[in-house]
Image (spheres, rainbow, N blue to C red):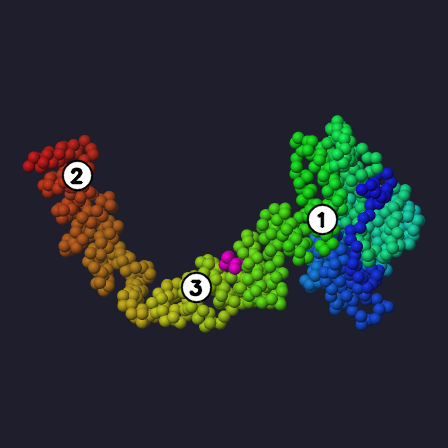
Amino acid sequence: MDCYTANWNPLGDSAFYRKYELYSMDWDLKDELRDCLVAAAPYGGPIALLRNPWRKEKAASMRPVLEIYSASGIPLASLLWKSGPVVSLGWSAEEELLCVQEDGAVLVYGLHGDFRRHFSMGNEVLQNRVLDAQIFHTEFGSGVAILTGAHRFTLSANVGDLKLRRMPEVPGLQSAPSCWTTLCHDRVTHILLAVGPELYLLDHATCSTVTPPGLAPGVSSFLQMAVSFTYRHLALFTDTGYIWMGPASLKEKLCEFNCNIRAPPKQMVWCSRPRSKERAVVVAWEKRLMVVGDAPESIQFVLDEDSYLVPELDGVRIFSRSTHEFLHEVPVASEEIFKIASMAPGALLLEAQKEYEKESQKADEYLREIQELGQLTQAVQQCIEAAGHEHRPDMQKSLLRAASFGKCFLDRFPPDSFVHMCQDLRVLNAVRDYHIGIPLTYSQYKQLTIQVLLDRLVLRRLYPLAIQICEYLRLPEVRGVSRILAHWACYKVQQKDVSDEDVARAINQKLGDTPGVSYSDIAARAYGCGRTELAIKLLEYEPRSGEQVPLLLKMKRSKLALSKAIESGDTDLVFTVLLHLKNELNRGDFFMTLRNQPMALSLYRQFCKHQELETLKDLYNQDDNHQELGSFHIRASYAAEERIEGRVAALQTAADAFYKAKNEFAAKATEDQMRLLRLQRRLEDELGGQFLDLSLHDTVTTLILGGHNKRAEQLARDFRIPDKRLWWLKLTSLANLEDWEELEKFSKSKKSPIGYLPFVEICVKQHNKYEAKKYTSRVAPEQKVKALLLVGDVAQAADVAIEHRNEAELSLVLSHCTGATDGATADKIQRARAQAQKK
């Protein structure tokens, strides 16, 4: 710790930069990095090398090898490149490797060398070939920018949703630009290119010339460009050896540095941490690395090997054949604590803790000094923050011990920041391990989030570590362990050297009923790998039929899907399968399948009743279901046929079906309907009016209302309408016509089979009590009281009730005695009741 600041290098008066080793690389490269296409993903991501790329001096028969390594140099994948010449490599935000070929095709590979997909950058790129390409990242995703042989630019801002955009042409451009880059500003992607001393900015519609303000004179060419990690700043390297730095909008200058080297650098990248006031650029040549900023001096390092720079959110990763290092600005908290002769509260607290461990009284002196200044809380926070930016675990522990020591002397210090920092550092140390190879810094980790880190561990198939992190951080199962187990299961089904039975059993034993795990998703992955039987076995563990059935249909296991849908009891699901089966099978096989599934057959019949009547008829014919077939023809006679002849023919077919079904009643009723239809047509022809489609009763009623009483009686005789029903029909019809004279004649034609109380009731209903009174004398004795009450003759009703000595009738009459005029009647009833009681 005494030499802790030995590798600190000042850049001006405002910042220090340090470079420390992340890993000692052991990847045994056979070629120099300069002879390979190199791509390294940010956030401690993997490294891709395309060895032996197409060069004129190489033998045409030699095929290159694409190799993928972790950041610590552990091999992840290696494959012989069998496609076309590659111009550029790059990693997407999802850690997919994008390989841009000369013909404009972009091949996408996974972290383990598995081919994912490919897409083309368009016909124009195909015709003119690719001169150069860059992979860039925006808020929309990962994009690809192409420079074609026609010196035109084509780009897509998001390869996940490919929308190609052809940029405007640069006037007079006859050769490739000396350098170019992509800029992302206000949700729009621009191309900045240099042609001689001129800079051109291309957007989706225009090409404009831009001039960096304050640029040193004498520039005849721009040799290199660099955009910061957040696309906010731009650096330009000129042929005069000057480096211009400013915002990406090119509206002002931050600083300019003369490096006194005119040779074009191999790489130039930004090196600045978030919210830093110091802006610095790292420039690399063959044997020299230079850090320049707003200071007259620069920081220089000697490169012993060919190196490659990877810009990060808060620094630069530098890897070579033997080492992998990280160069960054020393964070403010670390600088204040460890700077020589620092009197910052964090520095004093760290010293107090050290003296406390030595059992020295100086610990009390340092602590009192901090407390007297009221900076103990600030000291604890500084130590916690500095611990997060340390890469070595021993330094992390030292700072956290100091923070813990200081917390003991604070009454209300919230423990969350300390606890969370301990958790975060434990996670970071786990993923920084050489065998894992993800050298995330604390700032990168917070920007990336724990969910994305878990996704990256899953992509590397580090399932045990991912699960341990979830359990340690106590993440909800759906976001943590369940999701990781689901990914593990999807990977497990790809192991084709294990039997389907063993894989299914292993997955079920591991997953069980874990919430948030979908066996159907795992089965879909198995089916995608060509393991249909395994997918079916996995679906047996899926409790949701709605998830089982669609995949079974996709796998062309329709009959099994039908069984699962029926078991679920979900009629919509059954209908879905039935419609799929109907399109998949021929008609005969489809009907035979339905016969074996009564519930499905019933549901399909219901569907056909509303949608496919002809199919319903075929179903009944195949099953020899004459009863339903007869009902079908009856419905068809009314729904489909308009001509009377066609309807009668359909009814005749229905009657024949009913006879075959031995349903005599239905057959006779159908024949009667046929006779009625013929008669109704004849009545319409002879009498006019509307008779068709009326019921038998309505037909008789219509005849009576039309004054055709003899026709009505004849129709009643023909269809054997009972006398009681005919009298009711005639009574109601004549009353509705208010033909009281005819009604009276009808009542005297012969003795009424329904009695005469209905005559009284129907007249009263028509508000004609005068006519009603005519029939009260003919009403049966047991109904006479009710009839008299209907016509309002309460006194006579009372006399009849008293004569009958019927208590129920007396009570009924008494309930109608409501007015003063009925008082005598009520008294008479009460006296009759009293005399009856004496007797």
Q: Nearer the viewer, mark 3 or mark 1?
A: 1
Q: Which residues are magenta?
A: 541-549
Q: Residues within 10 Å of mark 2 (few under 14, many from 20)?
A: few
Q: CA distance from mark 3 to mark 1?
A: 59 Å
Front position in the image: 524 or 504: 504
Q: Residues within 10 Å of mark 3 (few under 14, many from 20)?
A: many
Residue 162, located in which quarter of the rendered image?
Answer: bottom right
Left or right, 82 with respect to 469, comes to right
Left or right, 52 with respect to 681, comes to right
Q: Which mark is first along the chain, 1 or 2?
A: 1
Q: Residues within 10 Å of mark 1 (few under 14, many from 20)?
A: some
Q: Nearer the viewer, mark 2 or mark 1?
A: 1
Extreme residue toward the top, this view: 372
Tell me the residue that label 2 is attached to: 811
Mark 1: secondary structure = helix
Tell me the kind of residue under disc 1: Asn
Q: Is residue 557 magenta?
A: no
Q: Which mark is first along the chain, 1 or 3?
A: 1
Is there CB contact under 8 Å for labels 3 and 2?
A: no
